[in-house]
Image (spheres, rainbow, N blue to C red):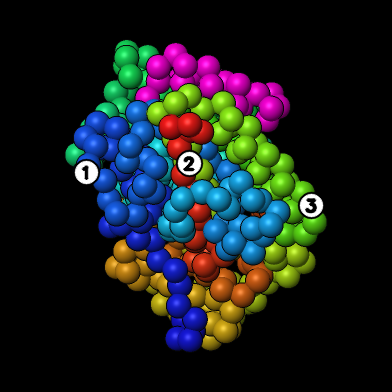
Amino acid sequence: MNAGIQPVLPRFNGACLSNLLPAIVASLDRPGDEPEWLPAPVRDATQVVVLVLDGLGYEQLASRRSIAPTISSGTGGPVTTVAPSTTACALTSLVTGLPPAVHGMVGYRVHVDGDVFNILKWRIGPRDARETIRAREFQRYVSFPRTPGATPEIRTPGGSGGERADLVPVVTRNDYRPTGFTAAHLAEAKLYGWQTAAEIPVEVSALLNDGHQLVYAYYDGIDRVSHARGLDQHFDAELRFADRLVADMLSELPKGSVLVVTADHGQVDVGPSVEVLGPDVMDGVTLLTGEGRFRWLHTLPGAEEDVASAARETYGNIAWVWTRDELVEEGILGGEPVPEVMARLGDVVLAPFSDTAFFDPADVGEQRLVGRHGSLTAAEMLVPLLAWSAPGT
């Protein structure tokens, strides 16, 4: 590891994305019992909307305040996401209130029974895995738990969550409703799909007027643009649009309600900078998983230390390198995974602190990405936590 550049570690005991919804639920149930990092408007709220702007890092927002005046006007500041700083991992931590070591959605692509399983696409290679990998068994903990902070609530095998009277409504892109990833992290929610972003404020307003205390909304435009274009003028244009979306949502809030805006991760503009792992490292490697900015190496038996040493020698000037045991001991995943979750990890991980990514020839889709995330830089790990009371409250 490069001693001069330190990773931003998840603040699992404080201002971390995994603690946000438990803190909001506690505030709604027991006003006056909020952590100091929870924005002040939430403390007096009778209803809360949590809007996730996928891919909006705090550093990207802070350098573009003039482009996003409404979002920048919110009360609050940065909190950390979880590690790896990637969507499947972070959104699951957000809605379950659990660290990755517990919920087990530990990356974009993970090892399952000798195969590479893509969690976001819920596929093994080209094959749909919804029948072979059951979402509610792969991720066993309920979303939006009724008693946050207590012993994690395990899902009922085969249940639908429909028996609960307190289902949290989720407003999300309609295309995502039937996916395996949605079933894995949002099974205890009632889904309301949108076709265009203009529908989000309409759906949220209707749900608040129906009396829901907590509404969760998700918009992915910023992340999509970053992946396709990087952090150029297209990103700026999308941020302007997201700012108008937030303004529209504020205009629809009923009295006493609060809007909270956060994100699952930030972004780094990698562009064409990709590192191909050399034979000095790959000689002891059997499989690659993870993502370009949090690349897991699965090693031959007994080769872990040699591979880690070679990776540090070759790539220590651009990336943090940990063995799996070191990563767990540092608490980067939020605890020690159970054996089932531990088996999804590799043996050595490379997480770049420079603006590059580690290439996996088996993941063709990732090769097209310009903006990326997954590592532990401030640009990826710090996300906004901002809040507004309804106008006139």
Q: CA distance from mark 2 to mark 3?
A: 27 Å
Q: State the mark number for residue 234.
A: 3
Above or below for 216 versus 6? above
User: Do labels 3 and 1 touch, CB within 8 Å?
Assistant: no
- Taking depth in this image into account, of 50 and 91 the one nearest to the observer is 50
State the extent of the magenta-drawn residues as a range. 190-213
Three-letter amino acid code at the position of disc 2: Trp
The quarter of the image holding the C terminus is top left
Work out whether residue 135 can be spotted: no
* Location of mark 1 (residue): 33
- The residue at the far front in this view is 392
Q: Position of residue 167 (x, y in %)?
A: 37, 20
Q: Nearer the viewer, mark 2 or mark 3?
A: 2
Identify which amino acid the numbered label 3 is placed on.
Answer: His
x and y percentages locating residue 197 in the rendered image: 68, 30
Q: Which residue is mark 2?
A: 388
Mark 1 or mark 3, which is nearer the start of the sequence?
1
Q: Mark 2 packing: few (<14 Cα in 10 Å), some, or many (20+)? A: many
Q: In the rendered image of this protein, does residue 84 appear above or below residue 340?
A: below
Q: Which residue is found at the position 40% from the left and 20% from the top?
A: 212
347 and 253: which one is in front?
253
Q: Quadrant of residue 210?
A: top left
